[in-house]
Amino acid sequence: MAGVGRSSYEKMYDGYLKYRLIRQKTSEGWPLSMTAVSTLNYTSQNDPNQSISGVNEYQFPTSRMSFVNELIIGRKFTPSLSIQAAAYMIHYNIVQRLIDKNDIYAVSIAGRYKLTKRFALTGEYAYRLTSAYALGTYYNPLGFGFEVETGGHVFQIQLTNAFAIDEAQVIPFTATSWTKLGFRIGFNLSRVFTL
């Protein structure tokens, strides 16, 4: 699978390739599915600190890029319940501060429970394996959602402590905590096109 997207936060464009390595078999065979995903992110925003620092951190196109490589292992336990775990390696070509790391490692767990044929509850939690990132305080992202399928469209409503939607922004830079009531409501609309 290949895809492209754009998120309004930091005017981030992304392109990704997704390849299923192993497919779960319902009878005899492999009990899990395994998928590899590789994403290239490109921010089109202007450097917000250029007027203060006098330096444009995005003077080179490669400075605008970040990458996410992900290995997803999942299992559909019943027609209603699916659970997956993922391992991430996120790379930023340029970082904000000298103590920031270019590479961030994380793991996550996510689940989906279908209440009916068209309605489902979802949840996801990601844990950063890389030690404290940047000078500020960042938190592990946690979110819960509700989704509605209508033919080819999927409408999702989430309650999460993350501000962004892209893994390259969510995993290293979630700046609010559920324990401090730092959660947000998000809305997504997905459409899958097949050839």
Image (cartoon, rainbow, N blue to C red):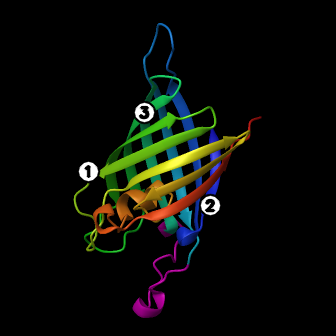
Label 3, secondary structure: give it: strand
The answer to whether residue 116 is left or right of residue 73 is: right
Above or below: residue 119 compared with residue 128: above
Crowd class of label 3 (few under 14; some 14 to 19; many from 20; radius 10 Å): some
Q: Earlier in the sequence, mark 1 or mark 3?
A: 3
Q: Which residue is mark 3?
A: 83
Instruction: Where is residue 102? Give x, y as percent.
Output: 34, 61
**Separation of marks 1 and 3 at Cα, in angstroms:** 21 Å
Q: What stretch of residues is rendered in magenta?
A: 46-63
The quadrant holding residue 72 is: top left
Q: Nearer the viewer, mark 1 or mark 3?
A: 3
Instruction: Where is residue 118? Give x, y as percent.
Output: 63, 37
Q: Which residue is mark 2?
A: 6
Label 1, secondary structure: give it: loop
Crowd class of label 2 (few under 14; some 14 to 19; many from 20; radius 10 Å): some
- Nearest the viewer among 188 and 129 is 188
**View extreme (left): residue:** 131
**Dominant secondary structure of the residues highlighted in magenta in the image:** loop
Q: What type is the residue that disc 1 sits on?
A: Leu
Instruction: Where is residue 128? Give x, y as percent.
Output: 29, 53
Q: Which residue is mark 1?
A: 129
Q: Are marks 1 and 3 in contact (CB under 8 Å)?
A: no
Residue at image position (47%, 59%) is 66
The answer to whether residue 148 is left or right of residue 164 is: right
Task: Inspect the magenta stretch and tell me whether residue 100 lies in it.
Answer: no
